[in-house]
Amino acid sequence: MSAAVLLQTKKMGVSFGGVHAVKEVDFTLHEGELRCLIGPNGAGKSTFFKMLSGQVTPSRGECRYRDRVISGLRPWEIARLGIGIKTQVPSVFEGLSVRENLWQAAANKMAKSAVPAAIAQVLQDIGLLHLADATLSELAHGQRQWVELGMILISRPQLVLLDEPAAGMTHHEVRKTAELIKAINQQSTVVVVEHDMEFISMIAQQVTVFNQGAVLAEGSFRDVTSNPLVKEAYLGNVEIKHA
Ligand SMILES: Nc1ncnc2c1ncn2[C@@H]1O[C@H](COP(=O)(O)OP(=O)(O)OP(=O)(O)O)[C@@H](O)[C@H]1O
């Protein structure tokens, strides 16, 4: 691949007491990628994600973003480098409207005069034009997730880290979320941790499979889901539909 390396970990891992949640992972992400991290329960993918986003400090190895070592930085320091993070805990303002939430996300990223047009565009992208003035607490689960994705979309980060963005969604909502993530990937490199294989099949380009705190396999969705080791460890030999 000719694209530049955007993020790279070298022998990065963390242990909690005696549990080696992530052992020593070498991981390379190139500019423009949409990478999915999958694996069975307890494989270490969420912990690995949390080390990328600063929620967990690695006990060994390092993570570089462009030329800078970012392992050990706090989440807000990582966000300041132009990395958009959506964790499992939503970071939206409950008492504010959809429009006001988007305004908060856009405020420091562009000239004030450009904000209204950017909000109008994102409201259309996330399909919530008709709910622009509803407060977040009035929205359904899926709609709140889309507001958060809209907040990422409007701030145009270079790298976007998404932890289980389709969790708890209906089939229809999952499809729409897949479209939104593909839209985000038009402007940003994206890493997604996800369980839902149907969702992954809709968005995946490259997939990294974790198992027992290490990378078990890496490649296209088709390659990894046909890999006998992956089938045995994760998929339970279930047949996966290829798009
Ligand atoms: N804060 C913590 N303290 C102790 N052990 C932890 C902690 N976080 C994770 N672990 C352990 O590390 C291992 C990897 O967990 P992790 O949540 O990263 O796996 P996962 O692949 O994301 O699983 P899941 O799909 O169930 O979320 C598990 O054995 C888990 O119990």
Image: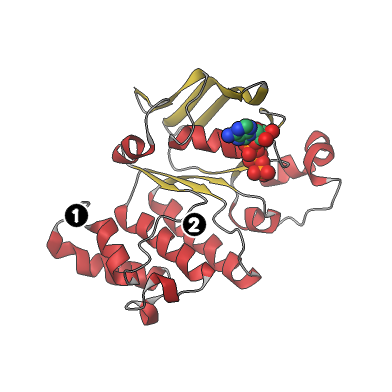
> Which residue is tagged 1?
110
Residue 218, visible in the rendered structure: no
Identity of the residue furthest to the front in this view: 17
Q: Which residue type does callout 1 highlight?
A: Met
Q: At 21% from the left edge and 57% from the top edge, which residue is drawn?
A: 107
Q: At 53% from the left edge and 63% from the top edge, which residue is drawn?
A: 177
Q: At 31% from the left edge and 64% from the top edge, which residue is drawn?
A: 101
- Residue 163: percent from the left, percent from the top? 53, 48
> Which residue is tagged 2?
181
- Identify the secondary structure beneath mark 2: helix
Q: Is residue 200 above or below residue 40?
A: below
Say whether marks 1 and 2 touch (CB < 8 Å).
no
Q: Nearer the viewer, residue 29 or 86?
A: 86
- Identify the secondary structure beneath mark 1: loop
Classify residue 197 as left or right of residue 78: right
Instruction: Return the mark for residue 139.
Output: none
- Residue 34: percent from the left, percent from the top? 52, 46
- Residue 204: percent from the left, percent from the top? 60, 50
- The colour scheme applied to this rendered structure is secondary structure
- Quadrant holding ligand 1? top right
Q: Nearer the viewer, residue 242 or 113?
A: 113
Q: On the rendered image, what quadrant is the C terminus found in?
A: bottom right
Q: Nearer the viewer, residue 156 or 1?
A: 156
Classify residue 188 as left or right of residue 145: left
Q: Which residue type does callout 2 highlight?
A: Ile
